[in-house]
Amino acid sequence: MTMTVLVTGGAGFIGSHTCVELLASGCDVVVVDDYSNSSPAALDQVRALAGRPLTVYRADLRDRVALDAVFAAHPIDAVIHFAAKKAVGESMDIPLDYFDINIGGTTSLLRAMWAHGVHRLVFSSSCSIYGASAKTPLDEDEPAAPTNPYALSKWTCEQLLAQACQRYPELAVIALRYFNPVGAHPSGLIGEDPLGRPNNVMPYLMQVAVGRLERLPVFGDDYPTPDGTAIRDYIHVCDLAEGHRLALEHLGDATGLRVFNLGTGVGVSVLQLVEAFGQACGRPIPFQIMPRRPGDVARLIADAGRVERAWGWRTTRGLADMCRDAWQFQKLNPDGYRGTTAPVLSTSET
Ligand code: UD1
């Protein structure tokens, strides 16, 4: 692909892996990130992995002046929009931040795209918009029923993108609804490194494995599942990155909004994940059964059929790969990116 792609949130977990995938496929990449939950060091590792430069701007998407300068400086063909806040629990505490950053960031980006004649967008959405739907597996036609401000912000963005596409028929938008992204690049150079105490199960497990945290709290063992713990559809971040590259390739197929689940279709319980991670790191992971976490549901599994029918694509990496690669990143970076000696970038660097 010979395209110039703007990646918002490119220093984050999924963004950084997608940048590697795009650079490897021949795209030129421009990143906008405010590093509010990521590190510039991730992008140094991306450059090292891809063996190619990329351009980085430190900016908040709601800063239209900064965004206009980025679009004016580069011949952007398409945008992949990751930059957003993503912690479900936090969103209950500070919903207005979630609405402002996630929805305000998206509308600001759309306005800048429109002003600069850029009509192609891949949007980072989430299976959380399905809410507490009891359906298994979940297909894209399942009605949205967001149960927290984070999910509501993603669903609102999907809706406003749909309306924008109606008003501006030149727009081509693909929303990708991720299930539970985990794993890391097999090199161990980039991976998931949340700031502060992890909310999600995999980064928590990784930090228990290196002794930064004592034991994993397992939230609930009384769900109606075979071992009583909740089931999720974990997807390897490299599969997810490939999905984004493919979405870019298919943006030109049609205008309007198209929506795809990205998951494996395979359900894994918390205890199965703990066991698999223990295998990967060569020792059992200490855990403790705790009460259920408010807002959690028993089972969330993707029907990943639509993307396969549309693009002939399915995930190729399994649970053992996810655990092996996540462990490789944690082993090489026990303190995450804070342990690396990468220089801090300021406004822009090629
Ligand atoms: C949530 C969102 C998802 C979002 C993801 C990342 C929903 C329905 N899903 O996924 O859209 O992309 O966060 O922000 O809102 N668990 C433990 N111990 C822990 C942490 C988690 O047992 O310390 C369990 C949870 O109870 C759950 C499973 O592990 O059953 C996965 O939890 P988590 O990694 O937080 O992801 P979700 O809540 O499924």
Image (cartoon, rainbow, N blue to C red):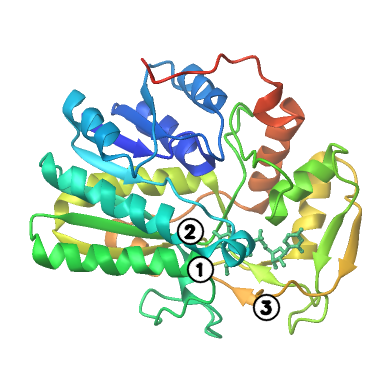
At 32% from the left and 53% from the top, the residue drawn is 106
Residue 226's spot in the image, x, y percent? 77, 79
Q: Which element is circle 1 on?
A: helix
Query: Within 10 Å of the Cα at label 2, are there few (<14), some (14-19), or many (20+) other Cα atoms?
Result: many
Disc number for residue 149: 1
Q: In this rendering, is residue 193 above or below 132? A: above
Residue 329 makes an appearance in the image: yes
Disc number for residue 98: 2
Cα–Cα gap, marks 3 and 1: 20 Å
Q: Quadrant of residue 102?
A: bottom left
Cα–Cα gap, marks 1 and 2: 7 Å
At 41% from the left and 47% from the top, the residue drawn is 82
Q: Which element is circle 2 on?
A: helix
Q: In this rendering, is residue 7 above or below 179? A: above
Cα–Cα gap, marks 2 and 3: 25 Å
Residue 302 makes an appearance in the image: no
Identity, as a three-letter code, of the amino acid under mark 3: Ala
Q: In this rendering, is residue 226 above or below 334? A: below
Query: Within 10 Å of the Cα at label 1, are there few (<14), some (14-19), or many (20+) other Cα atoms?
Result: many
Q: Earlier in the sequence, mark 2 or mark 3?
A: 2
| Badge 1 vs badge 2, beta-carbon distance below 8 Å | yes
Residue 211's spot in the image, x, y percent? 88, 38
With 105 as the anchor, is 76 left or right in this view? left
At 35% from the left and 62% from the top, the residue drawn is 307
Identity, as a three-letter code, of the amino acid under mark 1: Pro
Residue occupied by mark 3: 298
Q: Nearer the viewer, residue 177 or 39?
A: 39
